[in-house]
Amino acid sequence: MRLLLVEDELDIQGFLKRSLEEAGYQVEAAADGKTAERLAINGAFDILIVDLGLPDQDGITLILRLRELGVRAPVLILSARRSVDDRVRGLEQGGDDYLTKPFAMAELLARLRNLLKRKNPSGNEATRLRVLDLELDLLRREASRSGQLLQLTPQEFVLLEYFCRNAGRVVTRSMILDQVWGMRIHPDTNVVDVHIYRLRGKVDSNGQQPLIRTLRGVGYVLKDR
Amino acid sequence: MSLRTGNPKLRSAAWRISLWATLAFAFGTMLVFVFLQRFVENDIKRRSDAWLSGEVEVLGNVAERTPKNALYGRVVREVAELAGREVPNKLPSDSESNNSVFFLQRGHDDSLQLWVGAGSGEDTLRAILTSRMLPDQPTDVRVKGFAVPFRVACIRIDDGSQIYLGLSERDELRVLNSLRIRFLLLWLLIVFFGFAIVFSTTKRMLSHVRKITEAASRIGHSDLNTRVPTTQRNDEVAQLGLTLNRMLDRIENSMHQLHTITDSLAHDLRSPLTAMRGKLEMSLSATSHGDQAEPIVSAIEELDRLTEFLNQSLDVAESKADALRLTRTPINLNELIRVMIELYEPSMAEKGLQIHFHTPNSATIEADAALVHRMVANLFDNELKHLPAGCTVAIRIQTEDDSVSLIFEDNGPGFSPEVLPLLFDGRVKGRGSDGHGLGLAFIDAVARAHDGTVTAANPETGGAQVTVTLPLVSSENIVSFNAVHAAN
């Protein structure tokens, strides 16, 4: 996957480039709009990350210019601004996405995956999900581990489904709140942790190998190996 | 709008101004007309008196010089009738039956010697005898059978008899009456036109003021793009509009500056936070030992709290300046509370708290979803953090005519009385709270941005109560709201 990273703050550009490369992307970086334009036209990129505050031009102007020049790759917009610009909303509706700074790396990676998936839909959706010995029937809304049916509430099933779809990848509390409860909130209480704790009590019960791991300060991961 | 209530015509300033102006104008013109009429009346009287005095002298001369024979009566009568035809102010139609003038000669024994005029003259003589007459000074005499008094002049001739010449004031009064009627009609016309002109002028002027008021009231909290209408004329109203617009320019400018400041503050703080968080995450992934990871983890958590604090502080600051930017969408409050309870119930149960949710009917508000979600989450967080185990939180949604109240009640210890009045200032923290004390200030900020209110109280029955009241959107409004958006 070829990725163009347009970010003028070299500090941020540096760690983003390394993290993205670790995640398996081929990253080219640009620090201003001119360079970005040149790179985007010459190299065929699968996805772009564009910061809104560039030194020579506005990030949105750059994106619109690239679209005019025939660049079709989806864009993840990074913004340190307070309010979400209406024009960003417009781009969001056009298939692009935005993320406000600061963000968790896991969330950035998840959003990139979503953008790429939207670009190349994998066709027919699976009706069953399987992670190690954990199995989910999406039609009957039933989950079982090692053949034993788990007694889950509908909410817990949605949470587990989200984990299974992102098996092996880190999910943050914000991502869980956004994807499972549909809210971009940041409670300063342990609401999400208690849900995970309860789910773990049902999934990882009676001495089985624990599947849901807590990565403190980062989030959670469902083991797939 | 309040201008539209009651009877709008009678309440409008145009009506009052023109009413008072017309009253003053009518009074003034009435005074002028009364004065004019007095003048005309006096002039007419003076002219008829002069005529009477002249004629009575002529008649006296004639009576003196004419020998007192059989012809005397005829000659004097002839002369008197001639004089009667030259009566001033006389209407021509009255020439046939001339009863507006009489000639009377009174003997020294108060007998009627000669009478020229309508009727026998006895009544007139009696009236003259009962009234005090001054020589050379015409006097008013009321005669039985005549509605209008006579103006009578008298002269004494050599033979001791007296000659009276009387002129009815009827014609004089008729002239004055017709003058009065004309004056009155003219006055009514002038007053009516005066009122119409004043009313239409002030109305036009004030309708402009009303347009300015309406435009100004449309200018909402952070929507400062609208301007009041202005005109080409350079009068006071136009200047009012121009001044308002200049004021709005300045407010918009400072609002824009505030946004620029908060934006750049957010940007300048967020960029280093992003870099820090990213580096910490990278070093965390490189660290495998648990005891080395611990400080990094707590640093990341501190950073996330700092970010949330920054966001809420800026929201509270912008809301206090009425500058919070909103993107409104319809939100079903019941559905939102239901989802939030699902989210918070496990944590509450973990702490030994119970939640009750009661709502009779569904309520939909038109609000900024992100802000309202965070506001409601703050309400739950607040209960979760401060309530001791074993307590119950009761959540109610109450709909009024045009507003909806979201009420959080608990049976805990309640707010401590000394912080109760300061709760929404953003500087108060509960004892032992690890939050930043902005929770309730943020709730207040969001409610204010949506034209709503928040109240906190310790009810009589115990515990604490927080009530958020927001304007309600009825189902028709949602339809029109969607229609407007579809049209855009």
Image: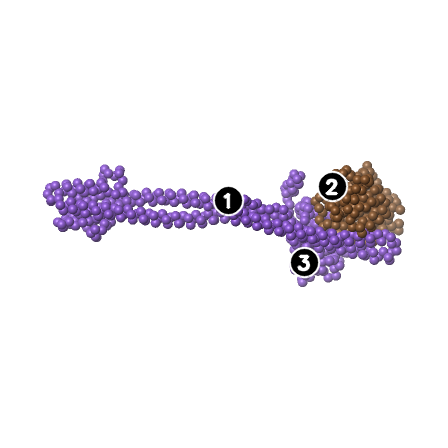
Specify which label sits upstream in the sequence, 3 or 1.
Answer: 1
Query: Label 1 amino acid?
Result: Arg
Instruction: Tell me the SS state at disc 1.
Output: helix
Q: Residue furthest bottom?
A: B418
Front in this rendered view, residue B361 or A216: A216
The CA distance from mark 3 to mark 1 is 47 Å
Query: Label 3 amino acid?
Result: Asp
Q: Is residue B3 visible?
A: no
* Quarter occupied by the C terminus of chain B: top right
Name the side, left or right, on which A121 lies relative to B82.
right
Q: Colour of chain B?
A: purple
Dot 2: chain letter: A
Instruction: Tell me the SS state at disc 3.
Output: helix
Q: Residue at x 79, y 46 (%)?
A: A6
Whether the residues at callouts 3 and 1 have beta carbons within 8 Å, the answer is no
Name the side, left or right, on which B5 lies relative to B96.
right
Q: Which residue is mark 2?
A: A64
Kindly indicate the quadrant of the structure image that contains residue B430: bottom right
Q: Residue at x 20, y 44 (%)?
A: B102
Q: Which residue is mark 1?
A: B204
> Residue B149: x, y in percent?
25, 47
Dot 1: chain letter: B
Q: Which residue is mark 3?
A: B425
Mark 2 vs mark 3: in front? 2
Q: Residue at x 48, y 44 (%)?
A: B200
The CA distance from mark 2 to mark 1 is 49 Å
Name the side, left or right, on which B400 lies relative to A178.
left
Q: Is residue B433 visible?
A: yes
Dot 3: chain letter: B
